[in-house]
């Protein structure tokens, strides 16, 4: 059964800027602490990444997975799902961008199912690190 979590941040930047930072996946290693590498394998007609290989730090080791992105609700939302992973059975996620005057309300929703079950305290620690990515996105967008 997948574990799900969500987080909301108000970012002092336009939705367009927040979306642009979220789409620049090759630069994630510059600001998302746990992302060690992001390689775009495919792009759509608008040059947005559609298939991306990631290498991330996870629970004291490195994990590799491939995500496929969906832009059917862009620019209000982008979503992704797992195509392939070494320790993941499923990953489904979404960034939602809502304008708030000169700022943006960004909602990060994530559901992950690992191949090997983990104890609850380890899951909670991992969840906190994953959701911290939204705080890192806020810092990047506001810098």
Image (cartoon, rainbow, N blue to C red):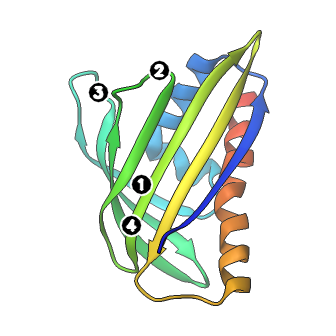
Residue 139: % across, % down? 76, 39
The answer to whether residue 95 is above or below residue 56 is above
- Residue position for label 1: 38
Residue 47: assigned label: 3
Residue 16: % across, % down? 56, 17
- The reply to whether callout 3 and callout 4 are in contact (CB within 8 Å) is no
Drawn side of residue 2 relative to residue 119, left or right: left
The answer to whether residue 73 is above or below residue 5 is above
Query: Which tag, 1 or 3, sits closer to the chain's start?
Result: 1
Query: Which tag, 1 or 4, sits closer to the chain's start?
Result: 1
- The reply to whether callout 4 and callout 2 are in contact (CB within 8 Å) is no
- Between circles 4 and 2, the one closer to the viewer is 4
Is residue 143 visible to the viewer in this orientation of the structure?
A: no
- Disc 3 versus disc 2: distance between alpha carbons? 14 Å
- Disc 3 versus disc 4: distance between alpha carbons? 26 Å
- Residue position for label 4: 90
- Disc 1 versus disc 4: distance between alpha carbons? 18 Å
Within 10 angstroms of label 3, few (less than 14), some, or many (20 or more) residues?
A: few
- Between circles 1 and 4, the one closer to the viewer is 4
Q: What residue lies at 55% left-to-right and 55% top-to-bottom?
A: 110
């Amino acid at each position: 059964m997948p574990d799900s979590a969500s987080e909301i941040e108000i970012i002092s930047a336009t939705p367009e800027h927040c979306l642009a930072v979220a789409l620049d996946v090759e630069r994630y290693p510059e600001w998302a602490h746990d992302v060690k590498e992001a390689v775009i394998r495919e792009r759509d007609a608008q040059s947005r990444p559609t298939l991306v290989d990631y290498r991330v730090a996870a629970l004291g080791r490195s994990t590799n997975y491939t995500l496929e992105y969906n832009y059917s609700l862009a620019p209000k939302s982008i979503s992704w799902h797992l195509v392939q992973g070494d320790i993941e059975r499923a990953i489904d996620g979404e960034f939602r961008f809502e304008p708030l005057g000169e700022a943006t309300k960004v909602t990060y929703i994530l559901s992950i199912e690992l191949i090997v079950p983990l104890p609850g305290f380890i899951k909670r620690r991992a969840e906190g690190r994953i959701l911290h990515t939204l705080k890192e996105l806020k810092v990047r967008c506001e810098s």
